[in-house]
Amino acid sequence: MNIAERIEQKLAALTPARIDLHDESSAHAGHAGAAHGGGHYRLTIVSNQFAGKPTQVRHRMVYSALGDMLQREIHALSIKAYTPDEIKT
């Protein structure tokens, strides 16, 4: 299982209606943090679990779901977290 598949597997804890995950690691080759491992990812996730929660709490929920992956496999993560109602507009 590759890193992107592991990310999606861990995010399943948030019962997402949709996950769009893009590996942008190649665009960051040579950057100082890239030498220590871990990829750069852009994530859009849609879940009812985000309802009524501010952006900061939503991001913490994502970080919590990913757990120890943030220590090694993920160097940078850009997150857009929505509820299904928010994404329809």
Image (spheres, rainbow, N blue to C red):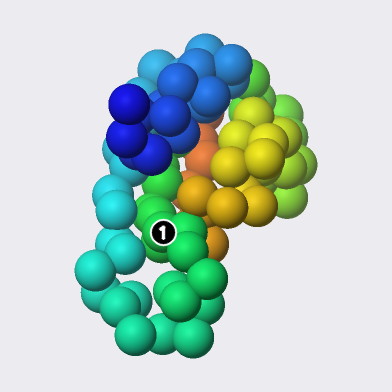
Q: Is residue 47 visible?
A: no
Q: Residue at x 52, y 26 (%)?
A: 11
Quick one: 65 or 52, which is closer to the camera? 65
Q: Residue at x 57, y 53 (%)?
A: 72
Q: Is residue 64 visible?
A: yes
Badge 1 density bin: few <14, some 14–19, many ≥20, Cα 10 Å: many
Provide the secondary structure element on which disc 1 rests. Answer: strand
Relative placement, left or right, of 72 versus 85 is right
Point out the image quarter for the C terminus. top left
Total residue callouts: 1
Q: Residue at x 29, y 62 (%)?
A: 24
Relative placement, left or right, of 79 versus 27 is right
Q: From what the image shows, is residue 54 above or below residue 11?
A: below
The x and y percentages for residue 45 are 44, 35
Q: Residue furthest front?
A: 36
Residue holding disc 1 = 39
Q: Residue furthest left?
A: 26
Quick one: 13 or 1, which is closer to the camera? 1
Amino acid type for the residue under numbered disc 1 = Gly
Residue 4, quarter of the rendered image: top left
Q: Residue at x 31, y 64 (%)?
A: 25
The x and y percentages for residue 41 are 39, 55
Point out the image quarter for the N terminus. top left
The x and y percentages for residue 82 are 50, 36
Relative placement, left or right, of 15 versus 87 is right
